[in-house]
Amino acid sequence: MKKITYLVAVTALVVASCTPKAQEVAEQKVLQVKVERAMIQKVNQVIDFTGNIEPFVKNSISSSSAQRIEKIYTEVGSRVSKGQLLVQMENPAYIQAKIQIQSLKIDLARIESLYKAGGASQQQYDQVKTQYDVAVEGLANLDKNTKLLSPISGVVTQRNFDNGDLTMGQPILTVMQLQPVKIIVNISEEFYPLSKVGTPVQIMLDIYEGKVFNGKISLIYPTIDPVTRTFSVQVSIPNGDLKLRPGMFARARVNFGAKDRVVIPDKAVIKQSGTNDRFVYVLDGEVVLYKKVVLGKRVDSVYEVLSGVEAGEKVVVAGQSKLADKAKVEVIASGVDLSL
């Protein structure tokens, strides 16, 4: 009994002696921080987009039916003019149609003489005249399918057949208009009201370091993609010296003017290791909250905030290294030095 009484007394003494220390450890340490308010500031909306240079117009030259190629008059890399003969197709029906027209022409002249002399009726004359007109129209259609002309002025960029090949209706040549060229970019829907035909666009290419090509918006697509929340814009670029070629990677820079944006000091932004995510500590009463932010442009010493922080909220700009989410803090004057 004496041993039991002794053990109880010792245990009580140990518990009593440890309780203040345990309470002290349990109390959260208050950390000192500096904060600044998120402000509204006008930020120039100069946005860069990427895309590939494309021909302004691309035409595939082919016959309307399976025909054999008699002769191709141009080669890859050749410049061609609108209406220029590119390919002559073989067509036995075309020769037969020409012979038939010559015969109908003689018949028409004969029946016309008889008609004028009273030896043929109006109906007989009209029948022969109709046959002749139909044959002429048919020959013209055959001629279109026999002589393949360039619909644009441009450059031949592809040749898929040789003389004597049977095409089966596939494209024989590809002709591209390279003066001007274009680039299609996808723009966030928030800029749809600010996008206007004629808006200047600066085009930069890595292969022409330091050189800027001037273009302009020439077409705005009328719908918004519900998945990406973007719309497409066509930018036309003069290309008199043909330095810009289809397939080249390009950046398009558009200035949409100044807009009111929430901005925070760059000192407040924390990059999470191993990711591209950015975070800030936002003051909430006596504690700070660790919040993810989406940033826009950096302007001097501030970042444009697209989401995550509202105007008027206070963000930690010094003392972050010892903080954690929901840590208690003491806000000190901006002139006080913190050893971080």
Image: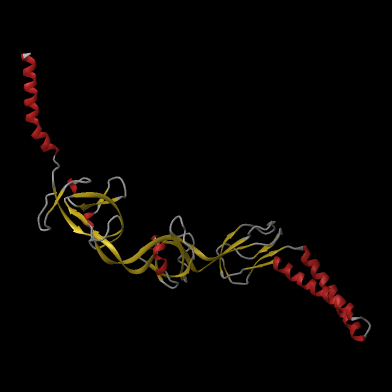
| Residue furthest out toward the bottom | 117
Residue 114 x/y as whole percent: 91, 82
Question: Relative to residue 206, is residue 276 depicted above or below?
Answer: above
Residue 59 picture quarter:
bottom right
Q: How is the image coloured?
A: secondary structure
Residue drawn at (70%, 58%), measured in percent from left and top? 164
Residue 154 x/y as whole percent: 55, 68
Residue 56 x/y as whole percent: 52, 67
Residue 54 visible in the picture: yes
What is the total number of numbered labels drawn onto the structure image?
A: 0
Question: Relative to residue 139, is residue 340 depicted above or below?
Answer: above
Residue 145 picture quarter:
bottom right
Q: Quadrant of the N terminus?
A: top left
Q: Front-most of 210 and 59?
A: 59
Question: Relative to residue 5, is residue 175 depicted above or below?
Answer: below
Q: Front-most of 81 and 247?
A: 247
Q: Is residue 191 left or right of residue 325?
A: right
Q: Front-most of 111 and 231?
A: 231
Residue 106 visible in the picture: no
Q: Is residue 105 left or right of residue 72?
A: right
Residue 142 picture quarter:
bottom right
Residue 47 x/y as whole percent: 36, 63
Q: Is residue 226 left or right of residue 127?
A: left
Residue drawn at (26%, 66%), measured in percent from left and top? 41
| Residue furthest out toward the right | 119
Residue drawn at (9%, 28%), measured in percent from left and top? 15
Q: Is residue 18 left or right of residue 306?
A: left
Q: Front-most of 88 and 188?
A: 188
